[in-house]
Structure formats: C-alpha cells, structure tokens
Image (spheres, grey):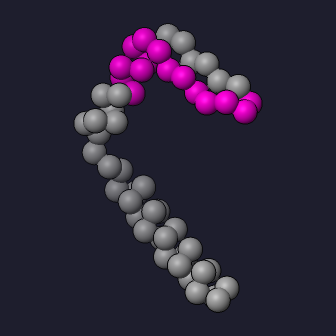
Amino acid sequence: MAIKSTTFGRVQLSGDDAARFAELVRTKQTNPNAKRTLKRGRAALAKMRAAAC
C-alpha cells in the first residue's frame, strides 16, 4: 500500500488500495444522505445566486 500526497498536490493510491477504490467507484450505490445534501446545496446556491442578481 502506498498513499502519496503533498500540501499542494494530489493523492495517489497504488496496489490493493487503488484496486479497491476503482471497484468502489464502479459498483458502489450512491449514498442517499449524500444525494439529499447535494439537492439542498444546489437549492441554496440557486437561492444565493438569485438574491445576488
């Protein structure tokens, strides 16, 4: 396992961690809480943009 990162760089996964991450991205179902949070965030952003204009 290797995780490489820097303050201004990206995170790089290798080995088993990279394979596991790729598998999760392909097969994992979306978290319902994350969907609700995204919906609320988009609504809040739209409200802020409407108020700024």
26 lies above or below 37: above
Magenta region, residue range: 7-21
Q: How many marks?
A: 0
Query: Which residue does the image show at 60% across and 81% down from the upper left?
Result: 49
Query: Please, is residue 39 above or below residue 32 in the view?
Result: below
Q: Is residue 18 left or right of residue 52?
A: left
What x and y, as percent, mark residue 38? 45, 63
Instruction: Measuring from the top left, give residue 13's x and y in whole percent.
Output: 50, 20
Residue at 55 percent across and 75 percent down: it is: 44
In this view, the residue in front, 9 or 32, is 9
Residue 16 falls within the magenta-colored stretch: yes
Q: Is residue 9 above or below residue 18?
A: below
Residues 16 and 50: in front is: 50
Q: Nearer the viewer, residue 9 or 26?
A: 9
- Please give the name of the residue rendered at 34% of the width and 36% of the height, measured from the top-left corner: 25
Q: Quadrant of residue 32?
A: bottom left
Image quadrant holding the C terminus, namely bottom right
Q: Position of residue 9 (x, y in %)?
A: 67, 30
Q: Residue furthest left?
A: 27
